[in-house]
């Protein structure tokens, strides 16, 4: 018997990375899983992987910046399986660059996808989750509380997700629902291959520390477990927990590390300008 037997799950950003691996893990644990995203071929691949586990999958193309597309996706899930038990707002990407270098369009794109679209996913999913006393999940990041130069827009978006999740958890609990906000550390995914405009480029180099990277299957297992247990907040990877603790109890240490990073960036720019 799987822990999600008979339950239906819908995941945005479900075609790649954490979304893909969470979908497969939910299916392994008995759920029927619908995945949404912009790249239909990736969604079909995930459904194929779900079916190989003996599960039932559904590919629903959806651009989360389009309210009508979100509504149609939920209607398709409910029309196919009769209900919605779990919704995961996983769609997102990272805008990189120092704050003085980022345009208004880059800021808008970052907040539109990572914050506003997550809020709209909740808005339209909650009426169906209320019927099943279901679970809603927001995918945040350790970057919600650990701030470093060159990532201001992404960090701001995830700090907003942290606040949204804490608020939503209180709002829905009296109605029998729960909201889990998950904050991963470094996990192997395609997020570094997406540029500041939200376009995927497989040739982009992932500059995150490889020695700290968690395997995506392992990450999916602990994330699905946190949703099953209806946790309000869940931070994972050892380095993620450590960094979050330092940010909370010794914020000066994070600040000084950020200053050193910024100084190193300036020195690198100066050397490049001289060459």
Image (cartoon, rainbow, N blue to C red):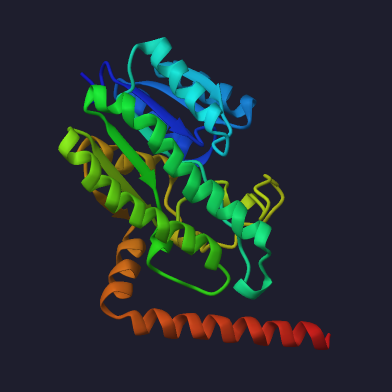
Q: Nearer the viewer, residue 185 or 141?
A: 141
In the displayed structure, 242 sits above or below 230; it is below
Occupied quadrant, residue 240: bottom left
The reply, left or right, for residue 182 in relation to residue 46 is left
Task: Out of 113 and 254, give the one closest to the viewer.
Answer: 113
Vertical position of residue 82 compared to residue 184: above or below: above
Residue found 47% across the figure and 63% down from its top:
156
Q: Is residue 109 left or right of residue 163?
A: right
Residue 52 seen in the current view = no
Q: Is residue 102 left or right of residue 259?
A: right
Where residue 70 sits in the image (x, y, percent)? 50, 29
Q: Residue at x 40, y 52 (%)?
A: 140
Whether residue 275 is visible? yes
Q: Is residue 63 above or below residue 59?
A: below
Q: Position of residue 174 (x, y in %)?
A: 16, 38
Quarter containing the C terminus:
bottom right
Q: Would you say 199 lies left or right of 188 here?
A: right
Residue, x 33% and y 73% (percent of image)?
A: 247
Can you give x and y, in whole percent of width and height, for residue 20 in the image? 48, 33
Residue lying furthest right: 275
Q: Residue at x 43, y 47 (%)?
A: 215
Image quadrant holding the N terminus, namely: top left
Q: Nearer the viewer, residue 213 or 226?
A: 226
The number of callouts visible is: 0
């Amino acid at each position: 018997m799987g822990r999600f037997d008979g339950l239906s799950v819908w995941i945005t950003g479900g075609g790649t990375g954490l979304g893909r691996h969470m979908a497969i893990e939910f299916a392994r644990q008995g759920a029927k899983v619908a995945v949404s995203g912009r790249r239909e071929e990736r969604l079909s691949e995930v459904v194929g992987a779900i079916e190989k586990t003996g599960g039932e999958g559904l590919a629903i193309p959806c651009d989360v910046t389009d309210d009508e597309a979100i509504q149609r996706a939920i209607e398709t899930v409910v029309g196919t399986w009769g209900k919605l038990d779990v919704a995961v707002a996983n769609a997102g990407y990272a805008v990189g660059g120092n704050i003085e270098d980022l345009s208004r369009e880059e800021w808008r794109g970052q907040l539109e996808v990572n914050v506003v679209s997550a809020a709209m996913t909740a808005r339209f999913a909650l009426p169906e989750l209320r019927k099943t006393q279901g679970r809603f999940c927001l995918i945040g990041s350790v970057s919600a509380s650990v701030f470093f130069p060159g990532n201001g827009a992404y960090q701001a978006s995830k700090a907003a997700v942290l606040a949204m999740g804490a608020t939503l958890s209180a709002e829905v609990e009296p109605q029998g629902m729960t909201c889990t906000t998950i904050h991963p550390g470094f996990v192997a995914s395609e997020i570094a291959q997406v540029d500041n405009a939200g376009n995927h480029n497989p040739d982009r180099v992932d500059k995150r520390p490889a020695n700290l990277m968690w395997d995506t299957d392992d990450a999916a297992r602990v994330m699905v477990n946190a949703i099953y247990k209806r946790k309000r907040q869940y931070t994972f990877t050892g380095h993620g927990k450590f960094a979050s603790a330092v940010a909370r109890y010794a914020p000066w240490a994070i600040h000084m590390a950020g200053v050193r990073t910024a100084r190193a960036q300036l020195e690198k720019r100066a050397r490049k300008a001289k060459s």
